[in-house]
Image (cartoon, rainbow, N blue to C red):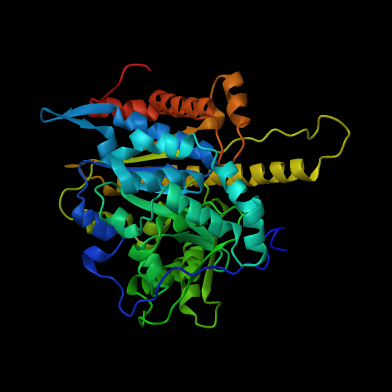
Amino acid sequence: MAIAGGCSSLGRIENEPVSTLPKGEQRYSMSHYTQDHPVGETLMFLAFSGGGSRAAALSYGVLEELRDTTYQVEGKELRLLDEVDRISSVSGGSFTSAYYGLFGERIFEDFKTTFLYKDVQGDLGSQLFGFFSLLRRIFTSVSRTEVAVNYYDKHIFQGKTFADIRNSKGPFILINASDLNSRSQFIFIQPQFDFLCSDISRFKVARAVAASSAVPVLFAPILVKRHEDCNFQKPAWLVDAERRAEENGDQRLLETVESLNFYLDKENPPYATLVDGGITDNLGLRTILRNVGLSGDVKKVYDHTFRKEKPRRLVVIVVDASTKGQTNIGRSKVLPSIGDTLTAVTDIQLHLYNTETNSLLRRKLREWAKTLSTPEQPITSYFIDLDVTGIKNEEERAYFNGIPTSFSLKKEQADKLIRTARTLLRENSVYQKLLHDLGAKAVAQY
């Protein structure tokens, strides 16, 4: 059984209980982060999708392009990368966001060799199916997911925790997974860990990334436990959100509220069972909608978060690494295989959900900008969607659709993905408008 898939494996619990939840600057939350990292005139939010190493490479390429784009403010040259305030990520994109959140500029020095150029999938396979590894797994309850966590922790994230991200000078990082029990998105931030009576600052980043990228069946879930040591009570903002959801018949908000109420019911299972974040949101965009929905009003969020200088530009850049898998369906009278059927079904569901999420946030961003605007300070929104399936050149589009969703890229594939991401961003019409409005300039063609 252990060889077949680790069916009898036991989950390892790494979120420690606390008697008192962290307060103030010790909390890993967006509101407390903003107090120490004031936002200027531009609020920039990046969303890195799932898609294995392909997603990680595309996300990295966007960071490179932002690094190499500069503009002038009062005679001082600034980089567009320095305007990034939040990064929300899923699955493969979480490797890039977490690494940047931990190590900052170092990502441009060693992330390619540390992750993008490595056959991580092959390395994990060797550890999982080597002779002594098989013997060890037969006689222990170690799952393949734990092997992955240990690998990520040792070779990529170097034992770092969320306290290290909190103490860094970079953007606020939101790593997203899916909880099979609450049937909802699970975000690795302190407000989510409050419901577990646990302190996220002690939690390993590698374990969060492993949860975010734990494709069901291939990898066992990551478990975190709901403790009962801190006497956590239902917060006022959740009570208010529940009232508004019921009064307005807001089904989307009601489902979010119910997913959080799940952790407050002691009759429910005590373990959150976390798998790939792409199941609930493959783009990493729903965190924005969730935050505004729970808060009740975008102006309330805006005024509370930005009490002093308020941003005049709202920028969202979505790096969508999803591809359209190639199958033999419909090419002959031969009925499709199970593999082709699963590929087609997954692609259909993923792309329809991505389209709905994109359209919803694009519309909301325009509405929010209009609501927040005043005659004295108009707010401009920029929704920049980078979709690999939208590559104009048919040959290049087919090339990228042929790159599998795995944790293994050849060097030439990684480099081409990075160049493509930079080109997609630079040629995007909304991005060009942002550059024009800022008076920014990108580096010469590479």
- Residue 71 position in % (x across, y down): 21, 27
Q: In the displayed structure, would residue 106 be above or below residue 198?
A: above
- 247 and 59: which is toward the camera: 59
How far across and down, in percent of the image, does residue 427 sit?
A: 41, 23
Q: Residue at x 57, y 61 (%)?
A: 221
Could you tell me if residue 33 is visible in this image?
Answer: yes
The picture quadrant where one finds residue 289 is bottom left
Coordinates of residue 68 in the picture (x, y in percent): 30, 27
The quarter of the picture where the C terminus appears is top left
107 and 196: which one is in front? 107
Residue at far top of view: 445
Q: Is residue 268 above or below residue 37?
A: below
Q: How many numbered circles does the render carry? A: 0
The residue shown at (22%, 63%) is 25
Residue toward you, 196 or 439: 196
- Looking at the figure, which quarter contains the N terminus? bottom right
Q: Is residue 122 left or right of residue 116?
A: right
Q: Quadrant of residue 296?
A: bottom left
Q: Which residue is situated farthest in the left direction here?
A: 74
Q: Position of residue 230 (x, y in %)?
A: 35, 80
User: Going 50% across and 82% down the picture, which residue do you hit?
Assistant: 266
Instruction: Establish if 135 lies above or below 12.
Output: above
The image quarter containing residue 244 is bottom left
Q: Is residue 276 visible?
A: no
Q: Kindly give the residue lying farthest to the front in the view shown.
A: 132
